[in-house]
Image: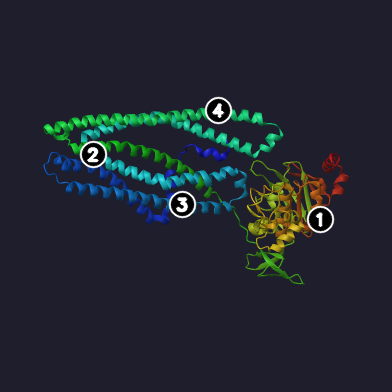
């Protein structure tokens, strides 16, 4: 089942109290609005309870005395009915007020929570995203936030209102008739016993239904995304068979869940009718007998009976609502725990203190920090004695006996040592999983090495602030990601300060200008759906242009031309050469024809560099690279 659907069933929070206090911290800026809400809820619930009680004096003090009167005076009756109308209008107004205010409170609180989530997410290490699916993270912003919205705007006010109503009704029933109240309590216990038995079955099957829904939704999502593959391999019939199986499981679970859910309300309604009829019969008997003689403790007037019967009808409903809203709140608290789990994730640690600054370099090599963009950079290195040194950014990268594993017990790089001089092109070749991409991830400090050292211009990269380190690098990944926006904006993503002219120059450098100008609105064409209206090769060209506009001293190409056909690759070869000129370049490629002009080629196998040298040197060795290259040559 895809992680996006894991949390669809009823979940219980592990630490409800702690989670509730954290939610309250988001509500604290709205304390005055919440006070208004509480007051409005009390008035609204109290109006309903008081309004029902008014039936007793209306009947006993006004209607009964007027029956058979020669000259009935209705003024008193009109006054009390008008007062009753005012009470109900006030209750309705307060209901509107607390619902409206809670909508604003919930929207504002969740706005702050989403902002905190998104801001914190930007600080999380790559490891967090590598170990979780996009759907799992997205569910925090969608499913879990939605459950919190329902809890804040609906469930909590409804829970308070129902609780006040239950307490108020119970007190009023005790005032009207203790014997009938005891009868009501006994009937309620019977109804709750039935709810527990039938509702328990329903809850069990609903969990199965939610799980089945997750499986069905996940399968449909996979099929939608993979329709091209399904059709290419004529897998339609098999897909339908698989869907029929999981859809049947959903149908079975849904039928069972809704069977019990559907019979629960009719059972409750019928029991409530039995309860009402029994109360009416006993209450009427007491009222009739009370009119004939004094029954003392069991005495009951006609007006009191009418009010009590009305309370009987309204007593069960808020109790049921309390139970329902309590479940919604528990589910929301479980969702909030997942949100706070994201917020509690440790942000990416950055102990670096060396920063990247614009620089001016004198003829004698002296470096000065500049307050404007000069096209030259330097590492600003503060020392413990209070002095500052400036090292020009040249792009020299050195690995010294680096060991690394994504998990402590699974080492993927073993004793990696290499040196890239400024302006050199270093290529990594090897089978999938050999560790090529891992090396580039370490250069970016997406992960920190536990053993060994990586130096950049002679500075241990652990001393360089991550943001500054990454600003000095640019990557073109195998999987190109384009954002919703214009072509111009997507290229400018590499350098937000770049002018339109610089963006266009970068596009020309990558040979992307020609196809961009043939788009409907040229550079102003809006891309959506990760650039789905472009070919894979065009998307890759935009990624190369994005790297070019960043103008970095170090460039990392991770299968940068893998999605570009041979003809397109030939077109951009000169542009790529211009892009790489004067820069230190790390290239990962399966097409060995793209790495022949590298200064050094590293052949990796199981996280170890087994061969290194230039193309001609490795061919002469007739080792692994020779086998790979000649195999590729023969295949071509």
- Most foreground residue, 82 or 325: 82
Quadrant in which the N terminus is drawn:
top right
Q: CA distance from mark 1 to mark 2?
A: 91 Å
N-terminal-most mark, 1 or 2:
2
Q: Residues within 10 Å of mark 3 (few under 14, many from 20)?
A: some
Q: CA distance from mark 4 to mark 2?
A: 51 Å
**Residue 94: x %, y % from top left:** 33, 50
Left or right of residue 213, residue 20 in this image = left
Residue appearing at x 24%, y 37% in the figure: 308
Single out the residue that lies furthest toward the bottom. Answer: 363
Q: Residues within 10 Å of mark 1 (few under 14, many from 20)?
A: some
Q: CA distance from mark 2 to mark 3?
A: 40 Å
Quadrant in which the C terminus is drawn:
top right
Disc nearest the viewer among 1 and 4: 4
The image quarter in which residue 234 lies: top right
Left or right of residue 336, residue 543 in this image = right
In the rendered image, is residue 283 in sight? yes
| Residue 185: image tag | none
Q: CA distance from mark 1 to mark 4?
A: 58 Å
N-terminal-most mark, 4 or 2:
4
Residue picked out by circle 2: 307
Dot 4 and dot 2 residues touching (CB under 8 Å): no
- Most foreground residue, 160 or 275: 275
> The residue tagged with tag 1: helix, strand or loop?
helix
> The residue tagged with tag 2: helix, strand or loop?
helix
| Residue 107: image tag | 3
Residue picked out by circle 4: 248
Residue appearing at x 63%, y 36% in the figure: 223
Where is 198 relative to 501, above or below? above
Residue picked out by circle 1: 574
N-terminal-most mark, 1 or 3:
3
Where is 287 relative to 604, above or below? above
């Amino acid at each position: 089942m895809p992680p996006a659907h894991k949390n669809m069933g009823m979940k219980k929070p592990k630490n409800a109290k702690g989670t509730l206090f954290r939610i309250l911290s988001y509500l604290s800026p709205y304390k005055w609005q919440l006070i208004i809400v509480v007051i409005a809820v009390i008035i609204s619930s109290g109006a309903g309870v008081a309004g029902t009680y008014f039936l007793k004096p209306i009947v006993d003090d006004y209607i009964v005395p007027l029956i058979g009167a020669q000259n009935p005076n209705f003024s008193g009756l009109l006054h009390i009915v008008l007062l009753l109308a005012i009470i109900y209008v006030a209750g309705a107004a307060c209901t509107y007020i607390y619902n409206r205010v809670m909508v604003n409170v919930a929207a504002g609180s969740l706005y702050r929570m989403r902002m905190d989530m998104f801001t914190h997410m930007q600080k999380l290490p790559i490891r967090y995203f590598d170990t979780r699916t996009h759907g799992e993270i997205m569910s925090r912003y969608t499913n879990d936030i939605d459950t919190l919205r329902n809890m804040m705007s609906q469930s909590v006010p409804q829970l308070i209102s129902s609780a006040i109503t239950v307490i108020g009704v119970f007190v009023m029933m005790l005032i009207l008739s203790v014997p009938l109240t005891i009868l009501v309590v006994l009937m309620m216990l019977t109804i709750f016993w039935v709810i527990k038995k039938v509702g328990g079955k329903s809850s069990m099957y609903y969990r199965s239904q939610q799980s089945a829904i997750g499986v069905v939704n996940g399968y449909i999502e996979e099929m939608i995304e993979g329709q091209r593959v399904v059709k290419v391999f004529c897998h339609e019939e098999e897909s339908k068979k698989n869907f029929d199986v999981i859809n049947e499981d959903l149908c079975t679970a849904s039928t069972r869940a809704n069977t019990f859910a559907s019979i629960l309300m009719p059972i409750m309604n019928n029991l409530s009718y039995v309860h009402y009829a029994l109360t009416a019969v006993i209450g009427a008997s007491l009222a009739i007998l009370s009119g004939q003689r004094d029954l003392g403790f069991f005495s009951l007037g006609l007006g009191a009976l009418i009010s009590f019967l009305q309370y009987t009808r309204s007593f069960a409903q808020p109790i049921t609502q309390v139970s329902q809203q309590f479940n919604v709140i528990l589910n929301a608290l479980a969702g909030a725990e997942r949100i706070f789990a994201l917020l509690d994730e440790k942000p990416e640690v950055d102990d670096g203190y060396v920063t990247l600054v614009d620089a001016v370099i004198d003829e004698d090599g002296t470096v000065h920090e500049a307050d404007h963009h000069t096209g030259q950079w330097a590492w600003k290195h503060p020392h413990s004695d209070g002095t500052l040194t400036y090292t020009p950014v040249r792009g020299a990268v050195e690995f010294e006996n680096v060991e690394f594993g994504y998990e402590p017990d699974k080492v993927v790089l073993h004793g990696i040592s290499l040196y890239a001089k400024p302006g050199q092109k270093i290529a990594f070749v090897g089978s999938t999983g050999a560790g090529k991409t891992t090396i580039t991830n370490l250069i970016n400090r997406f992960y920190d090495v536990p053993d060994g050292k990586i130096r950049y211009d002679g500075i241990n990269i652990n001393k360089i602030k991550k943001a500054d380190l990454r600003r000095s690098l640019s990557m073109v990944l195998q999987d190109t990601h384009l954002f919703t926006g214009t072509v111009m904006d997507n290229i400018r993503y590499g350098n937000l300060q770049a002018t339109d002219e610089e963006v266009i120059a970068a596009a020309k450098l990558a040979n992307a200008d020609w196809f961009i100008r043939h788009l409907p609105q040229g550079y102003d064409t809006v891309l959506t759906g990760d650039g789905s209206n472009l070919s894979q090769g065009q998307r890759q060209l935009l990624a190369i242009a994005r790297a070019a506009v960043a103008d970095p001293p170090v460039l990392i190409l991770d299968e940068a031309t893998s999605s570009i056909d041979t003809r397109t690759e030939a077109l951009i070869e000169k542009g790529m050469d211009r892009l790489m000129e004067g820069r230190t370049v790390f290239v990962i490629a399966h097409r060995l024809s793209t790495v022949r002009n590298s200064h050094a080629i590293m052949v990796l196998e199981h996280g170890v560099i087994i061969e290194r040298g230039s193309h001609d040197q490795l061919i002469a060795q007739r080792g692994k690279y020779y086998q790979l290259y000649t195999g590729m040559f023969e295949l071509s």
